[in-house]
Amino acid sequence: MKQIVLLLLLSLSMSVAASAGEPGMKGRESNPSDYGLSMVRPAPADGGTRSKNNYLIITTDKYNTAVSRFVRWKTIQGFNCIVLTKPSWADCDEVLSYVSEAHVLLNPKYLLIFGDVEDVPSTHYACEYAQEHLGVPYFLSDVPYTTLHSPLQILRPDMIHGRISVSNEQEANVVVDKIINYERYPVEDEEFYNTSTHYTVPQDVIDENGDGKQDDYFLLNSELIRNYMMGWGKTVNREYIYGNTLPTQYMDYSLQQGYLVSEDLQDPSVWQATRESLAEEINKGRFYVMYSGHGGIDGWHDFTVDDVSRLTNGNKLPVVYSETCLSGSFGAPSCFAESMLRKEDGGCVGIVAASMTSHFLWNEALNIGMFNSIYPAPGIRAKIGEYDTPQWFLDTRKMDNGEPCYEMGKVLQNGKFKMVEMLGDTAIIDSIMIYMFHYFGDPSMEIYTETPACLDPSIVQDGSTVSVSTNGVDGCKIVLSSLSGDHILVEENTDSASFTDVTFPYTVFISKHNYKPYVMHSVNYLQDENVKYNRDILADSIIAGSDVTSLYGGGDVVVNGGKLTLVAKNSIQLKPGFKTNGGKLLVHKGTDYICPFSYDEPVSVFNGSQMVQDPDDPYLTKSDAFVSADGSIYVDGNTLVLKFMDPTDVEVYDMLGRVVYARSGLRQGSVDLSRGVYTVKYGDSLKKILITKE
C-alpha cells in the first residue's frame, strides 16, 4: 500500500512576517491582530502579565459569543487563549498558514478548532486506503495542523488538538455549557464515577453461520479492559449482543482461536442488550462508555444518531470511546460523534472517534493505550479467560507504568503512541490510523476518575498582595487572573502562592485532579448565563443581570433548573435580566460575612428574602423545629448541640460541601453556625438543617 504525502504541507515553506528570533520580537507577547484577524476578546494591555500555557483557537465570527464564554472559563483556569477568527476560511491551506504563524510566534500547547468542517476546513489525507474503503481519494484529518515542524513527527506533534464540531450558535452554546459544567460543577454522585458501560457486538455472533469461535478482537478487547478497570475498583456493566451462537473461544492477537472465554460469558442473560437498554445505561450516568464492534457514520450497531436524540442523561456526561469505523466522519452532515457532543441535556462531554474506516486490531490497541495512559499501574496485560497469555501480536507487555494522564487530548495522543509501539513496524497503516482518530471536545479537559473532593482554602488580601493557601492540599494549581484576561499568574504543583501588585479585580482558581475546582472572585459579574444544574458562585461581591459589565456579551441570567447558590462577603445585587424559571435560588451570608442583598424590579426572586430555599424540600428542617428523633442532636438558636451515649463520628458540611466541623468519637460537643443550609452526618444518620438565626 502506498502513502501519498499531503501537498498542502508544502505551504510550510511560506515566509512568516515576524519570527520569534527577529529584533523586537523577543520578550513580548504577539498581538493576534498581527495576523490581520479580529479577536474575540481584547489583546493583552501593555504591562500585562500572561501565563505561557498558550491555547490557540481557530473559529469563525458566528461562534464569537460561545467562544467568548469558553475563553473566559479557560482564562480562569490559567490558559492564555489566542483566538483567530474570520467570517469564513477559504480552505485548509489558509488555516494551516495562520496556524503555522501563530505557532512560531506563540508556541501554543493546545489547538482547538471550533466549528464544523464547513466553518473551519480540515485537511485532506490522501491514500489508497481511502480509495479502497470509501471510494474517495482522501479522508478528513486535523492532525496535519499539529505537525508543523515535520509531517513525519505525527507521534510527537507540536500541539495537542481537538475539535468542537458544531454547525450553529445554539449547538456551540450547548457544548460550551457541557464542558464548563463538567469541569466547574462536577456531578455529585459517587455511583457515576464508579460505574461505566461497555457496549460490545462481536462479529462472530452476528454472522448467520457463527460457531462461537471469534474472528475479531471486539469481545477480547472489551473483556480485557473491563477486567483491568474492575481491578481499579470500578463497576463495568456489560451491554453485549449476540445472534445465534454464544461465544466459546476468543481470537487472540496472534490470529489464533482456542482461547476459552470466561465462564460467565456462557450465561445468555449477559447477551441481552438492546438499543433501549443501552440508552437506559447512559441515562443513569456513567463516567465513561466504550464501544467495541462495527460502526458507521450513523453510529454503532443498533444504536445510532436517532437513539442519541432521545438520551436524557442531563449533566451526567460520559467520555465516550468510539474506536470504530467512521463514527467521527465530521465531513458528513452530522456524524455519530458530533451528535453525541451536540446533544442538549444529554449525550457526552467528549468523544474519541475515527473519520475513516479503521482496522479493528489498531482500534483495540488504541483503546488499550488510552486506558493505560489514564490508569498506568500496574499496566494492562493481555491475560484473560482460561489460559495463560499466548504469543500476542499486540504486545501489551510494553505498558510503561508511567505517570497518569487525564487531559483527553493528551490521552488520545498517548494512546496513538502506544498503539504504534504495541503493533511494531507497520508504518503505512500506523500513520493512517493516527491521522483518522480525533478527540471531539476540549483537548485540555481532564476526565474525572473518582468522586471529587472539596477544597477549603484560605485567601487573604493585604494591600496589593493576595496570598492563597490550600490548607494542606499539595500538588495544586493556583491561578490568579484579571477579569479582562490581561493578567494570568500561575503557580503549579504547590499548596500555596503569593501574588503581588494585584491592583485589579481578580479571580482565584485552585484545582487538583479529582477535586472540585475552587473559584473565588473579588467581583463576579454574572451575565448571559443559562443555569440548568446546581451551581455555586463565591465572591466578595456579586452583580447579576443582563447588562452589568462590558467585559463580555450581554444577555439574561436565567435559573432554569437546579439550584443557584450565591455566596458573597460584601454585597449581592440582582439587576434586571435576572430571572428564576423553575430553578432554586439560595442567597447566603457565609461565616463572618456581612452581606447586603438587593434586587431591582423586574427581577424575579422567589420571595425577595435573603435566604430562599424550596419549601417543598422534604430533607430540610428549619433550625427552630429541629430535634433528632432520639434527642441526640438539636439546634438552640444558631448553635448545633451534639450529645451521644456512645462515641460517634460527626461531620458538618456547609452548602458548598465544605467541612465546617468534624470530630471522631465524639460524646458531647457544640458548634455555632451562621445562617444557612447545613448537612449533618453523625454515625449512619444524615440530616439537612436550615439555620434561620444569626
Image (spheres, helix red, strand yellow):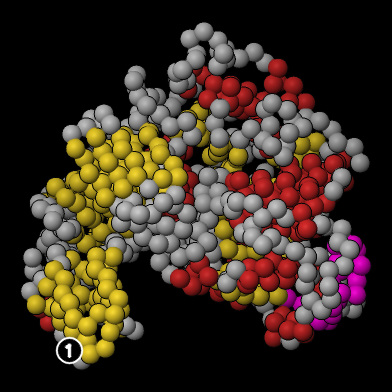
Q: How far across and down, in percent of the image, does residue 645 sit?
A: 23, 90
> Please, is residue 98 above or below residue 572 in the view?
above
Residue lying at 7% horizontally and 74% vertically, measured from the top left: 637
Q: How far across and down, in percent of the image, does residue 642 sit?
A: 18, 80
> Please, is residue 220 above or below residue 26 in the view?
below
Mark 1, other Cα within 10 Å: few <14 / some 14–19 / many ≥20 = few
Residue lying at 77% horizontally and 84% vertically, measured from the top left: 263
Residue marked by disc 1:
631
- Relative placement, left or right, of 513 versus 295 is left
Majority secondary structure of magenta residues: loop
Residue lying at 54% horizontally and 68% vertically, measured from the top left: 286
Q: How far across and down, in percent of the image, does residue 325 sit?
A: 75, 55
- Relative placement, left or right, of 544 versus 276 is left
Q: Quadrant of the N terminus?
A: top right
Q: Report which quarter residue 257 is drawn in.
A: bottom right
- Relative placement, left or right, of 211 versus 650 is right
Q: What count of labels does the image hold?
A: 1
Residue type, numbered disc 1: Gly
Label 1, secondary structure: give it.
loop
**Residue 248 visible, this angle:** yes
Magenta stretch: give its range.
241-260
> Please, is residue 626 above or below residue 92 in the view?
below
Name the one closer to the observer, 293 or 73: 73
Name the one closer to the observer, 121 or 5: 5
Q: Report which quarter residue 58 is drawn in.
A: top right
Name the one closer to the observer, 134 or 43: 43
Residue lying at 64% horizontally and 51% vertically, measured from the top left: 402
- Residue 250 belongs to magenta span: yes
**Residue 129 visible, this angle:** no
Q: Quadrant of the C terminus?
A: bottom left
- Residue 188 belongs to magenta span: no
> Please, is residue 504 above or below residue 587 in the view?
above
